[in-house]
Image (cartoon, coloured by chain):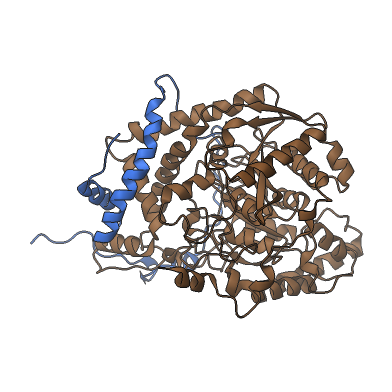
Chain colours: A blue, B brown
Amino acid sequence: MATLSRSDVEHVAYLARLGLTDDELTLLEGQLNHILDQYTILATLDTEAIPPTAQTIELENILRDDVAGPSLPTEAVLGNAPAREGDFFLVPPILTERD
Amino acid sequence: MPGPADLPRLHAHEQSALLQAGELTSRELTEAHLAGAERDNRVLNAWLTIDRERALAEADAADVRIAAARADGSLDGTHPLLGIPVGLKDLVSVAGGQCTAGSRILEGYRSPFDAHITERIREAGAVILGKTNMDEFAMGSSTEHSAFGPTANPWALDRVPGGSSGGSAAAVAAYHVPLALGTDTGGSIRQPAALTGTVGMKPTYGRVSRYGIVAFASSLDQIGPIGRDARDAAALLHAVAGRDERDSTSSPAPVPEELLTLPASDDEAVAALRGKRLGLPREYFVAGMEPGVEQRVREAVSMLDAAGAIIEEVSLPHTEYGLATYYIVAPAEASANLARYDGIRFGPRLGNDDVLDNYLTTRGRLFGAEVKRRLMLGTYALSAGYYDAFYLKAQKVRTLIKGDFDALWAQGFDALVAPTSPTVAFRFGARMADPVAMYLSDACTLPVNVAGLPGISIPCGLSEGLPVGLQFIGAPWSEAELFKLARGYEGLTAGADWRGLEPAELAAASDPATPAPLERLAAGAT
């Protein structure tokens, strides 16, 4: 199976939105490759004809009645926000003017 | 009538009998438990919060309910948890309270609502003493991955209580509460129960609603009870189980009333073992299993045999693929579930006020090492080009692992009997440097989650002075059957020397000279 290079580790950290230090990246490169080695055992099994299992109990189409109910009060929802403005979560701008 | 120091030693069903007879109030009972939890917590670190004020208010409310029920004649023993103190793992939402999941990224967060199981606990009239310590986001097998310091095992204060529900297990073992709730994604209820000499059950996937529980791996997570005997744990499961429309995976299967009627008599419990057909999976006696653990488990199996159970060696041929399957599926699901911790809607926000920098800094600094490791694994396993080789492959192997169990149920086995953990409690730090060694702690429990089955761990004696767990694994929805087997084994061993033992180092937990876990780790660091 695949081996992760340092730049692979950096790319995965970016995909996972984890800002990691150089020491963390070095440690993870070794540890992740060691763990991936354990996964190679799966490749020894022929699963060509085996369907995947995503969940183990046989429930289908569990839907509740489409009835409006009470929602959490705005204050309860916004009470944990690290930054807010009025009834809104305050976030940094994601669109900026082109230089 | 036992004195305040002895009340916490009683089982919940004994405490309940005193409450309902009017010989004891829930306030007195709650005070006695609070005193123990507050006295020991510096050393054990089993609790992240002990909410004295709230607990006493709930106790007073329970006393009012008991008095009213006595007055109108409805006090008929059908409220086994009314007035009984319980602990909740700190990933269960309690409106207005903290819910850290053992992580800095949820520090300061206050739950805006109650979890489904919190609502059920309140309806049952139990008293929530506080929130228990855990591995961060339930990722770990030792509680050493808590951002708030490890929990010590009351049997040996330099050893782990197991994890991730290690705080719940240690609190029950140390008589801080007779019952606590945990979650089990790969063994996180059963393995700490084994390592602390308590009873812990992971129910069938879908038995208990996860609404209001911090999610780790959604196709594996289940909630379950930890107690000091089978009857107490069964009563707590009964209280929280059942359909809830807010968790679409919670099952409409009826909750068995037998959970409330396990035999009080040891003889009756033992008699129920006769003729039970139990499979002994040979693959669960794994390489690396301690001889003392294997010996205790085999002795327990011999006793079940002598009591009239039919023991047959069986094979679960795909067991060896369980660890790899689990460590692909669980991190992959976690990488999706934990995307919500973005510093936008709750929790602290770090960084320089650029949105990407906020994400990277908040998540990079506030998640712990094990969580980051698993998010990396999961993200990689789901990333472009690797999905088929890892996640899809693991889901196919999952089918094979589940099929191994299904084949045994089709042959008419009532349950399987196996070790819970290959080792007794290990020392702090022993497995922290090697993630794979830590993952092997759950080799005998995680296939049960992969297959969605119920499993229970009960104490079966000591090895080198430390508790060993015996595991029963059942077909879907067979929790009552597993509790009957556990109760039968309790009956068989009711007179055993080890049954009367208290955790060996519990007394030292209240000694001001005993170091706290973090002090111990700092002193041991080289």
Image coordinates of residue B345 in percent, x first then y, are 40, 63
Q: Residue furthest bottom?
A: B512
Residue B340 visible in the displayed image: no
Residue projecting furthest to the left: A99
The one of B128 and B423 positioned closer to us in this rendering: B423
Q: How many marks?
A: 0
Q: Is residue B232 above or below residue B449?
A: below
Relative placement, left or right, of B175 versus A63 is: right
Residue A15 versus residue B389 in the image, above or below: below
- With B301 as the anchor, is A80 left or right in this view? left
- Where does the image place residue A24, in percent across and percent down from the top left? 29, 58
**Which quarter of the figure is the C terminus of chain B placed in?**
bottom left
Q: Residue at x 45, y 22 (%)?
A: A50
The foreground one among B271 and B64 is B271
Percent from the top left, x then y, of residue B138? 50, 54
Image: B408 above or below B342: above
Q: In the current view of this chain or complex, which residue is farthest to the top?
A: A49
The image quarter containing residue B204 is: top right
Please tell me which residue is depicted at 88% across the width and 41% down the height of the picture.
Answer: B268
Residue B35 visible in rendering? yes
* Picture quadrant of residue B42: bottom right
- Give how far across and how far down residue B507 sits, in percent: 69, 71
Q: Quadrant of the N terminus of chain B?
A: bottom right
